[in-house]
Image (spheres, grey):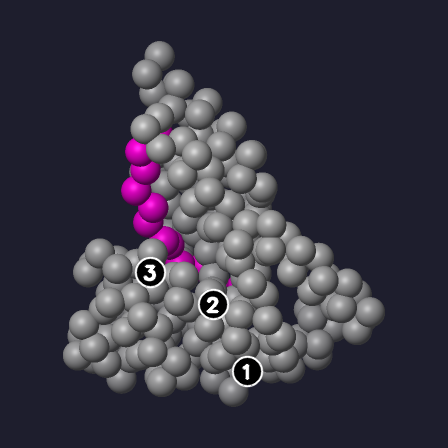
Amino acid sequence: MKIDFVSDVACPWCAIGLASLEIALSRLRGEVSAEIHFQPFELNPGMPPEGEDLLEHLARKYGSSREQLVASQAMLRERGKAVGFDFGERKRVWNTFDAHRLLHLAGLEGRQRGLKHALLSAYHGRGENPGDPAVLLSCAREAGLEEGLAREVVESDRYAREVRDAEATWQKLGIRSVPSIVVDDRHLIVGGQPPEVFEEALQEIAKEGTA
């Protein structure tokens, strides 16, 4: 089956959702075979290059207080720990468009999942800026991308149109929140669900395909 994982590097629930999905697929090995394609979505497309203080951003966007932020981060850490993702301390929100451009290249080179993991760990694990060329190139190396190709993308606007077009396509299809997991272009699973939810859903979809 084909799985389109529509997500943003800035989304903590996308990190949880991806880890949960991968656990589900490992449990279903031999029963379900899947290819994951990562599709771009920006939670904060207007975020300036210098980023924004996390608390100020959440207060402005959602009206969240410091106490709510602390409680939310504690809950995310627990959910992440349950699926093997370690959330660190992150104080700023950053622009992720260049990360999506690099992910586009990684998709062409068969290195997309490795780069996605590297970017999520850099952003949510270490609080690093995924728009910083040095961070992007470090993640590219970690994912096994050829450094010359990665550098060409990071130091230019290559694949900007492709990313914008893909974002527009998914928005036209009704994607408004992430993670959104689209299976075989027909089935939608939304949110950072536990592995059991993904496992059950993929089993049902696989049964439909053989009926």
Which amino acid, mark 3?
Gly
Q: Residues within 10 Å of mark 1 (few under 14, many from 20)?
A: some
User: Marks 1 and 3, how far apart in space?
Assistant: 25 Å
Read off the residue under disc 2.
121
Q: Residues within 10 Å of mark 3 (few under 14, many from 20)?
A: some
Which amino acid, mark 2?
Ser
* Lateral position of residue 195 relative to residue 74, left or right: left
* Lateral position of residue 56 relative to residue 163, left or right: right
User: Marks 2 and 1, how far apart in space?
Assistant: 18 Å
**Can you say whether 103 is above or below 57 in the image?**
above
The residue at the point 44 percent across, 30 percent down is: 202
The residue at the point 35 percent across, 73 percent down is: 139
| Residue 164 seen in this snapshot | no
- Which stretch is magenta? 32-43
Q: Secondary structure at mark 1?
A: loop
Read off the residue under disc 3.
114
Q: Earlier in the sequence, mark 1 or mark 3?
A: 1
**Can you say whether 105 is above or below 66 in the image?**
above
